[in-house]
Image (cartoon, rainbow, N blue to C red):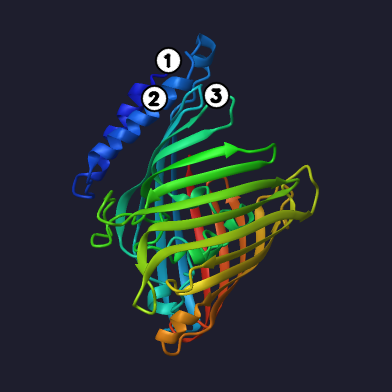
Amino acid sequence: MKVNPARVCQWFSVALHSAARPEKARLKYPHILHKISISLFIGLSAVTSPVTAEETAKETAVTFGLDYTSEVWTVASGGIKKGQRYLDNINASISKGWANGTNVYVSGLYNNGHSLSGDLVGDAQVISNIEAPVKAARLYEAWVEHPFGQTGINVKVGLLDVNTEFDVLEAAGLFLGSAHGIGTDIGQSGENGPAIFPVTALGARLQLPLAEKLTLRAALLDGAPGDPNHPKRTAIKLGGGDGAFLIGELDYALPAGKIIAGLWRYTASSEAWAGAATQKNAGAYVRAEHKIAGPSATDKGLYAFARLGFADADINVFSSFYSLGLQYIGLFTDDAKDMLGLAVATATTSKEYRQVTIGAPKRETALELTYKIEATPWLSLQPDVQYIINPLEGVKNTLTIGLRAIFTLQ
């Protein structure tokens, strides 16, 4: 059957309304969502040509995804105290695509809310990228994406996780430390953080090709994702002086890697450490990855990556951040189903923060050694060791050992 843009947008608007209103959420200013849906419909109607019988046959099926991630961690020495923690994450998703490229995606997640970094380690960069502050089951992402014909322009609107497309490298994705996802300089920012795991925000993303190997991405999202007073809810609260979060990124493709550079900014003002003035919070980053050894025809080989980022020193705990890492794919398996990685992530506290926080360290550094193997098509195992130097809480250097298991059903 033919794609009806009006029905897609109507469905999307109703889905967001119903998901965000009941007990788990609260939605303010619903007319704004209608405006977004109407705008998306106008754009789709303008560029989407009638779907032919041949294209109808190519429509993609509904796709379901379900995975369960579990982790067991032990603080072997240092930190706040020795101990063990069990963390978990359930992610379920459903998506539907059409022959003209339009795609609808909805996902939900559950976390047990156990604290590793906060209770045992005392670090600010967070040992595990599935650690969540509260036990909750929530709507996570819900969006419509549409490409505009052969122009290469692509628009996405809905509940978004900005870190799925911005400030992300494939090689760095192996590591469990949160700093190798989105940089600590961005992750620390905002009243309730930017729109990243585990709390997303309403927003829109534009992707625009500038040249053969150069792509521009830009997004505008709610400046305060969720509801800080009700952290278990998937809340969409527009207005109230929270402003917006803006991010733009240039992506340049290399023969076996890429370079990305981005700027981000909040439109609402934040209090400076001095306490007298308020100003806009902003920052910048540059990041790169490249295959430096191994056959070009396969994924097997050695990859290197690096990142450098800065954030406003008058507002943020950390004013700069850098990370470096190596990843080897296919060390023990010919079919590239295992990965070995070594990385370091260092966040430098701002001078202004140290002036108002007695005993604060100049920097916090996380060293990580990890190995991941796909044991079966539905199970991967990943032992991980991290050593934290100068945890922000001012405790002793910490040695932490963990094991992640991912069960996948798709």
Where's residue 388, x and y in %?
54, 78
- Please state, as top left, top right, bottom left or bottom right, where the N terminus lies in the image: top left
Q: Earlier in the sequence, mark 2 or mark 1?
A: 1
Q: Earlier in the sequence, mark 3 or mark 1?
A: 1
In the image, which is nearer the foreground, mark 2 or mark 1?
A: 2
Q: Which residue is mark 2?
A: 42
- Given the image, on which type of amino acid does mark 2 rest? Ile
Viewer-proximal residue among 409 and 204 = 204
Q: For numbered disc 2, what is the local secondary structure? A: helix
Viewer-proximal residue among 246 and 159 = 246
Relative to 381, say whether 207 is above or below.
above
Q: Which residue is mark 3?
A: 149
What is the distance, in whole Å, between disc 2 and disc 1 at their CAs? 17 Å
Q: Is residue 217 left or right of residue 198?
A: right
What is the distance, in whole Å, between disc 3 and disc 1 at their CAs? 16 Å
- Given the image, on which type of amino acid does mark 1 rest? Lys
Q: Residue furthest top?
A: 53
Q: Residue 366 appears in which quarter of the rendering? A: bottom right
Q: Which mark is residue 63?
A: none
Q: Which residue is mark 1?
A: 2
Measuring 80% from the left and 52% from the top, which residue is drawn there? 294
- Given the image, on which type of amino acid does mark 3 rest? Gly
Res. 108 visible in picture: no
Q: Residues within 10 Å of mark 2 (few under 14, many from 20)?
A: some
